[in-house]
Amino acid sequence: MTLERFQEATVEAAVEALTRQGGSRRFLIADEVGLGKTVSARAIASELQRQKGRALNVVYLCPNLDIASQNLGKLMALQENWPRPEDRLSLVLGKRPSSGRTDYRIYSYTPETSLPGWKPGQRTGRTAERDLIGSLLLKAAPTAWREIRAFDRARDGSKRRLFGPNLGEPPSYVKRPFEAALRELMGLERKKLDLGLQERLARWKDPLPEIILRCRAALAMAALRDPLIRPDLLILDEFHRYADLVMPTRAAPPDPHAAELHHIQRKLVEALVGKGENSPALLLLSATPYRLHRLDQGAIPGDRYGHFIGLVRFLHGAAGSSQGDRAESAIRAHHSALARRDDKPSALAEVGEAKRELEAALRPVIARTERATAISGEVFDRRVNEAVVEPGDLVTFRHLAHSVAKTKGAMRSWVQPLWSSVPYPAETLFNYNICKALNSDLPASTIASGKERPAHPHLRALVDNLIPKASTIDLDALTLPWLAPTRPWWTLGGRWGELASKGRLHGKSLLFSRYKGTPTAVAAWLSGEVDRRSEHRRDKGKTAAFLRPTAKAPWPLVALFMPFPTLSLAFEPVRGGNLGLDEVRRRARAELEKWLRSKGISVAPADGAPRKPWRLAFDLEQAVGAAPAITAALRQLRKLVEPNSWLRKTPTRSATKAEIIALADWMLGAPGIVVARTLRRHEPDVTRNSDRTMREFRFAWGQLRPYLGQRQFAASMQNAKRLRRTGGYPEALRQAVLDGGLEATLDEHVAVTKLVGSGGALDILEKCIVGRPGRVQRRTTRGLRSARVHAAVPYLGAERRNDRSKDNRKMRSDILREGFNSPFWPHVLATTSIGQEGLDFHVWCDRVVHWDLPRNAVDFEQREGRISRYASLPVRRALAERYGGAASAPWSSPFQAIFDTARVAKRDGLGLERWWSPAGHNPTSVTFSMPFSLGGLRLKRLQDELVNYRLALGQPEPHLFEAMIEHFELPRNEARRLALNLSPAVSIPL
């Protein structure tokens, strides 16, 4: 990703602060949500490494594993061959990196999992941590270790053993640092470690969690002191959510046990942040840096005003106490000026002067760029859907109210808010306390009621397609296996063409609710509706997937998904937005014949029945291509086919005209060849050897084939009559690949993902597909039952999915996020606002749906900031409209050509207008309004607050700034002039 002007200025200011002699070496980037703070941090690391001239240790901390997984990929672009490290400090030393030549060593952690004892509760870590601890204690304190073993065996039989039976040999280089750190943390420097641990074990009420916590902390401290891990650059992302790490409470708690934990925490922070010359360059990232919280989610004592002063003093550090004094004086003067309500000209003049003084005091340590101070107009296209209450909704309400009144009268106040938010509450609220009031009886309308209208006002308003509009979700569009490309290579056909002609072809939708029950209910109903519309519902109840190979005739299907290394390069499909498929096929046939002649394949007269395209593809690959690579790829299907059985004794070197025509048509829509062509465009220098072909086939056969074979896609692929003709579903799939522009969609997806991430094109494709549909539970008259969720899914945080291999663990939420950021299912992601700050959901999403209104303007901004980001779908539409005529070289990416042309075009402003918020291509923000409810008034107030909030967002006291605007009735332009502007780019000539 090339930096824009405002980012270049931010990087320059940050590097100057982080390398200033005698300075604090601390800097805060507080850019508005979605403006690429992590990308700026990556550029800062690059410049620091260049100045340092040797390996730079980069340690990245963020509040949760979702953000860590997402942003580590961006940072890994600095050193793409750097192996992904352990995600806990206590484990990283067990797999210590080599000291060989590298420019960067990159580590990513969360405070909760890597700084033991920070959050209350007994946290015993992972099995790998405990195994390493056990192996170290066995060597360092054998007697204490035997006692620990005895405690573990004596645990309640219902509890699992914390330590495994077989402990490996710990790395030799870990023993001494671990023992030294453990002594320091436990105050055992002058005592034998074994004896000291025995005394502590006897003193603790529950010794196992206590000793594990201290040993995990010792491993973390030892790692932070290791020269190959100790940070040169420490990045604290979303630091406001764990601000107590850098702004701790001064006094230790009176309780001895709590005081000991406090001591351990401060020792860990000291090892992390350092002191004096040993301290790393410290880069803070946060869009809301004045609203500080502890890691346990409690608020830091004091108000925003006090937080701001404390934060600025921390940024200036002890070495910059005089600058801190000046900044504090400027903050107080600004506060006083904003509070004036007397003579308007005098008050506004004082505000302007105080603003300039404060900007001068803060710019050495803080940079913030905001859309509101750079772009006029609204960022979102705001739509309000009218949600009408119907008699059936009141039946649901009455059922819920009567059930609660009978057995849980104290919870009656919850009935109305839950009913207004959660569809089908009797089925989906089993995880709430109120569910104890619900028996197995259900109201008349349920999720599985069939073709009835959805039993919730918001749900009906969301899927009402009587009048096509951007604020609704088209249920037919949910059945599409992939989204249409922003810039089609030819005229779309099939279901994609139908929806496009009716103005119903949109991007994905991100839905936010207040309660956790809502995402589950909405996803279950939408996915159920897709099931009801799918072909298998009208196909005698068959549920088996399509594209399943048979032992009798596996080869046609195998060939369809084979990325033939040589044959796939025979021709490129012609591109032109107004071209029809007949012209595309005509040119493909001519190009294929020309290529075959160049390879010595003659065009022979017809003699007997023509070969099937799949058979001819194998024959030609054997004759002119990489036969060993195909055989190697087929070894993955040993149980289905003999890897060498596709080979002929004498390879053919001729083909008839009819065979060439049929093969060209087949190659245009064969998914395996489409994948191969896409990869060739984006990775032209990658050698197509056997290993590479095996991996490409593994993706096409093992991921893409099962996904495209889901029966829910049958209706979108073709209608039932065309499915029954010769070729069946595979032929319908090839036609759909052309109708829906799959190759253009894949090209666009790889191009946009490579802009900000790391990894190659095949890495990107392998992360596209979620895999098996998820399942959610719902209450039925027969107890809890599971429902499939696929087209729409709930996203409820950083769950970890354990695969069979311990080394192949991946968060389910991470898989869902990557799938949502691809053109494939899910098309709707339903979630709450909790914990989503900093996450990207923008790649193929153009709509935010506020199922429930957010509590305040801050939450409004955070929700919408998930999709209003760099190179989002609306941005790409604007770029394609303006630069879509850019020519691309043969075997290069057409959408990458659009990006490249936009890059070299004359810059507009600071770069925000082109890459974040282009005029006329805004994302959509959807809210709901019920007649006679307070929702409409609340929405109007929130929208008014949001306008002022976006101007005041960079202010340490936004409410005071908003009050001044309201009191003096300032127009927006005047308010914009008085808003605090900490962007380093203000001095750049435009």
Image (tube, rainbow, N blue to C red):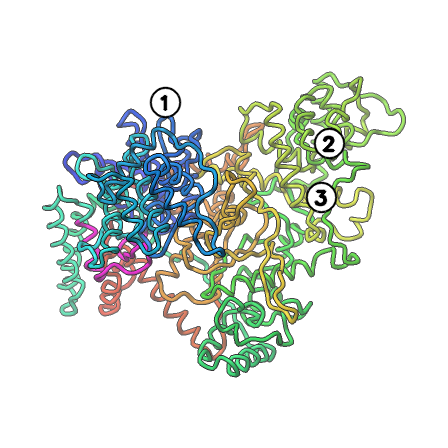
Task: Report the front residue among 445 and 733.
Answer: 445
**The quarter of the displayed image where residue 144 is located:** top left
**Mark 3 vs mark 2, CA separation in Å:** 16 Å
* Left or right: 489, with 670 as reference point: left
The quarter of the picture where residue 336 lies is bottom left
The magenta segment: 287-313
Q: Position of residue 8 (x, y in %)?
A: 31, 38
Mark 1–mark 2 Cα distance, whole angstroms, equals: 49 Å
Depth order, front residue of 26/684: 26
679 left or right, relative to 94: right
Of mark 1 and mark 2, the one earlier in the sequence is: 1
Count of numbered tags = 3
Residue on which disc 2 sits: 664
Dot 3 and dot 1 residues touching (CB under 8 Å): no
Disc 3 residue type?
Leu
Q: Could one spot residue 507 in this view of the protein?
A: yes
Q: Is residue 986 visible?
A: no
Q: Is residue 472 above or below residue 17?
A: below
- Quickly name the residue at label 1: 101
Of label 3 and label 2, which has the lower sequence position?
2
